Amino acid sequence: MSAQPHVNGAPPAGHGGTRAVRVVLAILALDVLGTGLAMPVLPTLVAGLAGLSPARVSLVLGAAIASYSAMQFLCAPMLGALSDRYGRRPVLLAALVGIAASHWTVAFGGGLASLLIGRALGGAAAANVSTVMAYLADVSDGERRTHLYGSAGGVIAVGLVAGPVAGGWLASFDPYLPFAIAGALAALNAAYVASWLPESLPAAHRRTFDWRRAQPLGSLRALFGNQTLRPYLLALLLTWAAYGVFQSCFVLANQARYGWSVIDASRALAALAVGMALSQRYLVRRLTARVDNRAILALGYGCCAVAYLCYFAASSPWLTYAGMMAQALGLVADPALRAELSRHASDRHQGELQGGLASLVSLVGAIAPLVGSAALAAAARTGGGAAAAGWPFALGVASYACALAIVARAPAGRAAAR
């Protein structure tokens, strides 16, 4: 990538656009803070709305998570392609407005239907993180890109530290209050984008909008048509499948095992986020100075396999916390994987790549929580009690073991022409 300044007021690519990077990372932190507010409250909110048995609640929770992912699958490629055509800033602004509307639909609509509609609307507008990743790719290259993706992961984790803790506290007053506050944060973030964020994609690097490649199937066909990308995409599928199980089962499984409250779950998720922040902010930088992305992936996937094994076998909270520590260390793989994928896309296609990845992740996210929820419900029906609550995490162990084997055999490949 050229180190010369971008046109149209964009930040210089080769130097990372320091001020612009700080602004976009602050926007990302505020966005994730809003998302984190609602995260630990969702299971309790679903239980209160539906008035169902624990087994049924897990299925409804899976449906709420899946509705978000399904809409993201449909819309993310189009938003990514639009950001390649019109720039990152307008797409990010529109996404944040949509996210504000989605949170307020849940907060003020009332009822299960409003919850599902709000989640679906949020999924349709969920181009924020992928657009930020495309923005960071615009202003960086090589090892610098891995560092920035690690910084983004650390910022996400910091937002997730404060979000679940604050969300659990706000929910003690009213379970809908975290969603109202999250909507206000998204609206504030949109105003911040409009006022402070410069455009990163110069006019010379923009491309025409291709409707065929902006559709989910066309986007996925383009991604998997690249043989160098294919093993890393398979690893992405497997690891996000494991995360879908974690997302739908972690809180409910530990409620069954240990009788955790919403506050307990919030504290656990916050502790995990602290570990993520430390590993991605500091450990990634040290690892990239010594080993390549593929070695970081192998290390990360091995740690995450151990983490899910702990979740599977946990009989006390201490083993669960040990798994969370291993998972936090293992998540150094995420920025390495994003950087490895990004370096195989040209400047004109970073938005398409990130949108396609978001669509792929959301496709898995629409299915994996349902699989995890169904496994947890089946475990509850066996009468195995607290001991059976860990069964779904065996799927995560298998997923990470397969991802580790795939990455170990993946070719190195060459970076795409800029």
Image: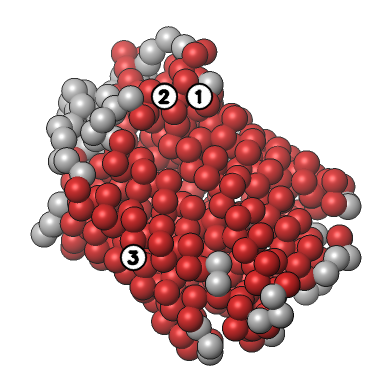
Pick out the residue farthest to the front: 382
Asked if labels 1 and 3 touch by Cβ distance under 8 angstroms, the answer is no
The local secondary structure at tag 1 comes to: helix
- Which structural element holds mark 3? helix
Query: What is the quadrant of residue 144 in the picture?
Result: top left
Q: CA distance from mark 2 to mark 3?
A: 29 Å
Residue hosting label 1: 217
Q: In this orientation, does residue 191 appear?
A: no
Residue at left 53%, top 88%? 315
Identify the disc placed on residue 330.
3
Q: Is residue 384 above or below residue 123?
A: below
Tell me the residue at 44%/78% (across/down).
310
Question: Of residues 206 and 241, which is closer to you in this image?
Answer: 241
- Of labels 2 and 3, earlier in sequence is 2
Image quadrant in which the C terminus is located? top left
Amino acid type of disc 1? Leu
Question: Which type of secondary structure does the marked residue at label 2 adopt?
Answer: helix
- Give the position of the N terminus as an image quadrant: top left
